[in-house]
Image (cartoon, rainbow, N blue to C red):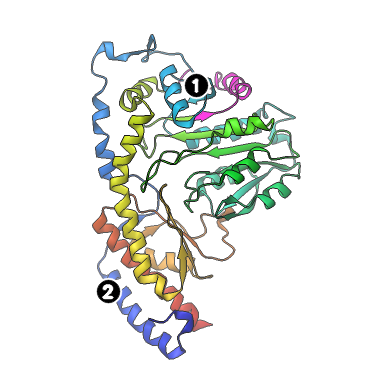
Amino acid sequence: MKKYAEMTKEELRAELEQVRAQYEELKARGLSLNMARGKPGKEQLDMNGPMMDLLNSESDYFCDGIDVRNYGNLEGLPSCRALFAELLDVKPENVFVGGSASLQLMYDTIAKAYTHGRVMGPCPWAKLDRVKFLCPAPGYDRHFGISESFGMEMIPVPMTAEGPDMDVVESLALDPEVKGMWCVPKYSNPDGIIYSAETIRRIASLRHAAPDFLLMWDNAYCVHEFEGDYVPFPDILKECAKYGNEDMVFEFASTSKITFPGAGISVFACSERNMAYMKKLLNAQIISYDKVNQLRHVRYFRDKEHVLALMKRHAQILGPKFKCVLDALDKEIAPLGIASWQRPKGGYFVSVNTMPGIAKATWKLCKEAGLTMTGAGATYPYKNDPLDSNMRVAPSLPPIEQLEQAMEIYCASMKLAALEKLLAE
């Protein structure tokens, strides 16, 4: 088949008639499918069921000489801190264990910068006329939501195959109003890019004009390969310390895509100075997080080796789902030249870039045919995708048979949107 851009108007009209008939048939099925968020599927959740039976008697509730049912240990169980230290390749004293959502820890870190300031000053951000934040895009919509909720001025930074465009980052960081940057450094959301060693070096050694610059290092997919072996990743705390930037960074991770998103644990890792400062502020906010759940995870995970073995089981479930999405795109869309996409080996998303100007139309057509997807534009600050092109596909939740139906709708919707645009030009 010809690429759409090479077709005559007559050929485009004939193709439109055929694709519209296919779309209407799919729409008539009355399906209700969801590829909006990176939720683990039921099979993944069921796999972790045995961890709920690990604490059955009074003697089970003791760990590190601590009765986990009681108050205390604000920063988390020592065994849990040690476990995440092994996963992130940091020291246990650099780890703080929170509740089920790393997003809450991220929000709280930003909030404390606004209310109390950063450990290296000079004043609470709420007292400043303007706070700017660098936002690699396409990126994670919930990061942008946090920034927008505080009234930050978000500055998009283009993503490259090696991570954020560091020439742009280094130039923008010379502005003292630029107070930080969001990063998803391994299997970035949504592109699935692993930051290169050179990109990480340039980030760690960043010369920023703001003394309280905050690097928000969301390592959400640190062990989340679904194809191939585990990919080791540099410890950003150590890298930053090499250049005197040890207080610049907060690293975040969680078990949301490993055990249960609604009943997991999250952590941040930071310098000793940041840890002392955050504990002082948090001590007025909470006595301790759920140590019973921390103990459950410690006994279920045991160590990094067992976590990676568990992730191999996740990969057996997720791998075929990602293959289903990529196979459909390769078969239905690639020959037409109306989109390009990443081919990730880990993480939770496939990032699709349609021809300019049709992402929103594709999303609307999907919705009308019963397929819920992440909103077009959501991967950019203020939901403003300048090309109206990027779409985030989340294959993890639907079973394969539903995913196949979803991709039928998605591909037909994209074709229809592309044809309508080309014929209107």
The residue that appears at 53% across and 36% down in the rendered structure is 234
Quarter of the image holding residue 323? Answer: bottom left
Judged from the image, the secondary structure of the residue bearing numbered disc 2 is helix
Q: Is residue 286 magenta?
A: yes
Is 271 colored magenta in this rendering?
yes
Identify the residue at horizontal 57%, vertical 20% (top origin). Answer: 279
| Rendered residue at 32%/51% (across/down) | 319
Report the span colored magenta: 268-289
Which labelled disc corresponds to residue 92?
1
Tell me the kind of residue under disc 1. Pro
Residue 289 seen: no
Characterize the local packing of mark 1: few (<14), some (14-19) or many (20 or more) Cα atoms within 10 angstroms: some
Answer with left or right where residue 164 lies relative to residue 301. Answer: right
Residue placed farthest to the bottom in the image?
10
Please state the horizontal and vertical placement of residue 331, each as a whole percent of the image. 34, 69
| Relative depth, front residue between 207 and 297 | 207
Question: Is 257 situated above or below 29?
Answer: above
Determine which residue is flagged by label 2: 25
Q: Quadrant of the N terminus?
A: bottom left
Q: Residue at x 31, y 54 (%)?
A: 321
Q: Quadrant of the C terminus?
A: bottom right
Q: Decide which of 171, 36 is in the foreground and name it.
A: 171
Q: Amino acid at mark 2?
A: Glu
- Would residue 282 be visible to someone looking at this image? yes
Q: Residues within 10 Å of mark 2 (few under 14, many from 20)?
A: few
**Which numbered disc, 2 or 1, marks the residue that appears first in the sequence?**
2
**Horizontal and vertical percent position of residue 31:** 27, 62
